[in-house]
Image (cartoon, rainbow, N blue to C red):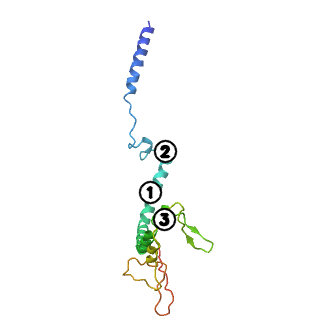
Amino acid sequence: MIMKPLAGLLISAAIALPGLAQDWQMPRADDPSTSQAPGNSDDPLGDLESELDGAMNQLFNRLQPHLNALGDELADTMNDFAPALNEISGLIDDMGNYERPERLENGDIIIRRRADAPPPPPLEELQRLLPGDEATPNRDDPLRPLDPWRRPRDSQDGQAGAAPQTEL
């Protein structure tokens, strides 16, 4: 007689358990897990992680003014070199037509045109963009390149002036 109630109990449990399993839902990705909850003592690296996070935030907060100043200086430098870079980009039709730069033994750096590249722009265009013999280029001529490597001359003794220094 005990077998009938036991069999009924097992059958009802077998039917009810899958129904109970359907109530469980996988946690969403943006919900913090219990191991990531603040104050959880189960995670031994939790305190280290929070301390490192605070230290990194302090470091970035201290570095931010210096990084902003460095970015401003780099922007100014790029603005100074923009005319020369624009002229170079006018001479180089497509960077894909050129090979990687090579440094020769004497220190010169050359950029070779690929053999399978289309014909380069005409030489007349190149000659028109090259600087003349004068020491200072005519700034009214937008096609005349400025020499970014030429140092200004001191008017009294004719020696090159000191290069600007950047202090961080």
> Which mark is in front, 3 or 1?
3
Q: Earlier in the sequence, mark 3 or mark 1?
A: 1
Q: Amino acid at mark 1?
A: Gly
Compared with 118, 131 (above or below) is below
Q: Nearer the viewer, residue 36 or 165?
A: 165
Residue 6 place in picture, x, y as percent? 44, 12
SS label for mark 2: loop
Using the numbered discs, state the Cα–Cα distance from disc 3 to disc 1 in whole angstroms.
58 Å
SS label for mark 3: loop
Residue 7 place in picture, x, y as percent? 43, 12
Q: Nearer the viewer, residue 44 or 65?
A: 65
- Residue annotated with mark 1: 54
Compared with 153, 57 (above or below) is above
Residue 24, image quadrant: top left
Q: Amino acid at mark 2?
A: Asp
Residue 101 place in picture, x, y as percent? 55, 66
Which residue appears at 47% of the width and 85% of the height? 133
Compared with 96, 12 (above or below) is above
Position of the N terminus by quadrant: top left
- Residue annotated with mark 2: 43
> Which mark is in front, 3 or 2?
3
Residue lying at the far top in this picture: please name it. 1
Which residue appears at 45% of the width and 42% of the height? 35
SS label for mark 1: helix
How many circles with numbers are drawn on the protein?
A: 3
**Residue 2 shows in this picture:** no
Residue 102 place in picture, x, y as percent? 57, 67
Disc 3 + disc 2, Cβ < 8 Å: no
- Residue annotated with mark 3: 119
Q: Earlier in the sequence, mark 3 or mark 2?
A: 2
Residue 86, image quadrant: bottom left
Using the numbered discs, state the Cα–Cα distance from disc 1 to disc 2 in whole angstroms.
18 Å
